[in-house]
Image (tube, rainbow, N blue to C red):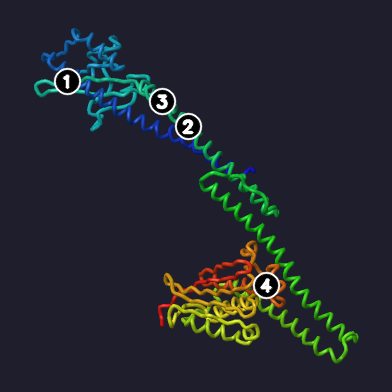
Amino acid sequence: MTHSLYYKFIMGYLLFGLLGFFTIATFSSKITDMYLLRENSESLYGEANQIASSYSSMYHGKEMNLSSSYPELVKEAQYLHSQIWIVDRQGKIVSDSQQPGKVGDLIANFDPTIMGNKSYAIGDYYHEFPYDVLSVHAPITGNYTTYGYVVIHLPLSYLRAEREGILNIIYLTAGVVFALSLIILLVFTKNVYFPLKKITAGANEYAQGNLNHHISVNTQDEMGYLAATLNYMSDELNKMEEYQKTFIANISHDFRSPLTSIKGYLEAILDGTISSDMSDKYLKRVISETERLNKLTQGMLTLNSLDCKGYLNRTNFDINRVIKDTAASFEGTCSEKGITFEVTFSDTIQMVYADLGKIQQVLYNIIDNAIKFSPEDSTIYIQASLKYEKIFVSIKDTGIGIPKDSLKKIWERFYKTDLSRGKDKKGTGLGLAIVREIIQSHGENIDVISTEEVGTEFIFSLPKSNSL
């Protein structure tokens, strides 16, 4: 991967090092030159003033006799790594710490005021040197008169050598810092690049359909969180794939059974297997099977609409009234089986804020199941009570109950327990799936408590309305 993230990081790291050294070589060199020039010029100017002050008292009117102090002048020049001249007003060299043979030479075009406001000058000093020097002047005065000058020359090669020494220290320090910064590269490689390679490989596996692949990144940072999230996603997608296979198998089975019955009855009527006096009976069965298909189709359409957002039409209504009306709609069925309802409300009126039509469907589906799986001459208990600013609705029967291993599966589409298949011949397996989708779309919860041969209780919550 020529243009991988790691390659870019390495290039950025090397570019950082290159630009860093270039910056040091360019700006540090100039800054060091300026610093050394300023510091040395100030130091030399101070020394020149001290020498001029000590030599002023030795001047006796017309000439300067410096032979007695010459050894001290030489020592001072050696200490300063420079060359010291004593020059009279006309520019004649009176004393030279390094070249005594120059004593008596006249500096051509000597002008001590040429420096202006600056305390130093850089150059060959009136062509007296074959190389550049840093020169400073200090006047020798007495009786308010200037009699001569102390001139100190420091070769610029000395400043360059000093600069190189300082820059070598800076380069060495920068090199050590750059080497230590490799730790950042190592940390990036271990904590970012290697985990990212594993995550990328895992993503490629998922893209190719291998949802069983596990990304082995177990760190407690963002990379570990990302890997855990992708692992969870792959597990859920794998479950979804299995669910889709089961879903297709179930829906195929539930559509095939009534279609086979319809086809068989109609063929028997047409070929005379079923006599004309029995045809009405079997035509009614055909109608019953078509109603089952219609119910199955309507259930699927309902679930499809529940998957879409913004379908709820919330209003404020009395849940007590809705429960009574829904229970009353089962009067005929209950009379046949001798089933009665015992309804309990914690208050006369209990207003909720929900979709009236959808909640009616929830109550209808749950009560319909309770009646189907309840024995004859039994009681179904319905209760609505206020708790924590929510209305909790409970529907409890004393029927066959739900096996423990099926409790989590009853919410799946087209799922039927083995016990319910013998009782619920016309069911589609979509009722409880629709119930859960409706309750969850309201942002509420539904739960089930069941024991075989004892009964089943469904409990769901609805938001309380503040309006009466």
Q: Is residue 141 above or below residue 7?
A: above
Pick whichever of labels 2 and 4 is earlier in the sequence: 2
Query: Do callouts 2 and 4 mark residues in contact (Cβ within 8 Å)?
Result: no
Mark 2–mark 3 Cα distance, whole angstroms, equals 16 Å
**Residue type, mark 1 in image:** Ile
Pick whichever of labels 1 and 4 is earlier in the sequence: 1
Mark 2–mark 4 Cα distance, whole angstroms, equals 67 Å
Of residues 41 and 3, the one nearer the viewer is: 3
Q: Is residue 82 above or below residue 266?
A: above
**Residue type, mark 3 in image:** Ile
Q: Is residue 463 above or below residue 99?
A: below
User: Which residue position is annotated with label 3?
Assistant: 169
Rendering coords of residue 415 (x, y %): 68, 68
Closer to the camera: disc 2 or disc 3? 2
Please tell me how crowded label 1 is: few (under 14), some (14-19), or many (20+) other residues with Cα within 10 Å.
many
Pick whichever of labels 4 and 3 is earlier in the sequence: 3
Q: Please state the total of marks drawn on the protein image.
A: 4
For residue 92, which quarter of the picture? top left
Name the residue rendered at 71%, 71% in the picture: 421
Of residues 372 and 90, the one nearer the viewer is: 372
Name the residue rendered at 69%, 60% in the picture: 242
Closer to the camera: disc 2 or disc 4? 4
**Residue type, mark 4 in image:** Gly
Secondary structure found at label 3: helix
Pick whichever of labels 2 and 1 is earlier in the sequence: 1
Name the quarter where the C terminus is drawn: bottom left
User: Which residue position is annotated with label 2?
Assistant: 180
Of residues 136 and 62, the one nearer the viewer is: 136
**Residue type, mark 2 in image:** Leu
Secondary structure found at label 1: strand
The numbered dot on residue 429 is: 4
Please tell me how crowded label 4 is: few (under 14), some (14-19), or many (20+) other residues with Cα within 10 Å.
many
